[in-house]
Image (cartoon, rainbow, N blue to C red):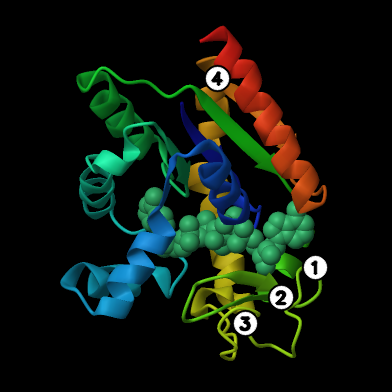
Amino acid sequence: MNLLLLGAPGAGKGTQAKRLAEVLGLLHLSTGDLFRAHLSQGTPLGQTARRYMERGELVPDDVTLAMVFERLADPEGRAGFVLDGFPRNLAQAEAFAQRLAQSGQRLDLACYLRVADAVLVERLTGRRTCPQCQATYHLRYAPPREDERCDRCQVPLVQRPDDRPETVARRLAVYHAETAPLIAYYRAQGILREVDGEAPPEVVTERLLELVQEVGRTR
Ligand code: AP5
């Protein structure tokens, strides 16, 4: 089963992709997480990505595609994958479709997590992350047990630099201009399903698992 989660920054792609990958035994591929890993390791790719991420812009397609294709070649992805944050524009979607076709694979399901912009802004500005284990919290919706410390690692949580209000506004504008057209792109292929991303996280997970089962029955 190969699926992707589509949605604006803060729609809950990362939260849900982690859960789905775990429950279904699939590879979780988040381009944002891969870029952040390169950043923290100080690789040349990370330094390139930083320039774009800090401004809320997309990292160039050639850099992103090379990184994704390398990760997809990993044997861990043999049972299938959950994509989170990729593809991000039509050029990436086309290049990805070609690559899948070359390897005799296909995308089974594209789930669009629908969330209003005002909710997204609140989610992003309230998000906190553990710098050690990368667990995600929200000051209001998913607070840590102890004041701004990771439940597991006990280290102080941090705010992602691109979650500051000025960068959030730019990321949302880029999403509407470049990524939102993918909703129509996958709808035209008959593989798009919409999910209410404003429901509580457990309800969203349940709905996504139902969709995966439905698609699994008709494959
Ligand atoms: P990336 O890391 O992919 O960020 P994003 O798409 O902007 O998405 P986020 O991680 O911000 O949000 P999410 O939808 O995963 O939400 P989450 O589950 O964390 O990309 C970062 C940057 O990298 C980009 O700006 C770009 O520069 C670059 N990049 C990445 N991919 C690229 C590509 N393919 N091409 C080019 N450049 C690329 O949830 C958010 C918050 O809400 C959390 O606090 C969470 O606890 C809370 N929450 C989640 N679900 C719910 C719910 N149902 N109810 C209440 N709260 C919830």
Query: Which label lies toward us, 4 or 3?
Result: 3
Residue at the top extreme?
A: 218
Which of discs 2 and 1 lies nearer the camera? The answer is: 1
Disc 2 residue: CB within 8 Å of ligand 1: yes
Residue 184 location in percent, x, y?
57, 26
First along the sequence among labels 3 and 1: 1
Label ID, residue 126:
2
- Side of 136 where 64 appears, left or right: left
At label 1, counting other C-alpha atoms closer than 10 Å, the crowd grade (few under 14, some 14-19, many 20 or more) is few
Above or below, 144 against 90 in this view is: below
Q: Is residue 216 above or below residue 91?
A: above
Disc 2 to disc 4, C-alpha distance? 32 Å
Q: Disc 3 designates what residue?
A: 150
Query: What is the number of the mark on residue 141?
Result: 1
The residue tagged 4 is 191
Query: Could you say whether the residue bearing mark 2 is in a helix, strand or loop?
Result: loop
Separation of residues labelled 4 and 3 (CA atoms): 37 Å
Amino acid type at mark 2? Gly
**Outermost residue, left side:** 44
* Residue 196, visible in the rendered structure: no
Q: Is mark 1 within 8 Å of ligand 1?
A: yes
Question: What amino acid does circle 4 point to?
Answer: Ile
Disc 3 vs disc 2: which is toward the camera? 3
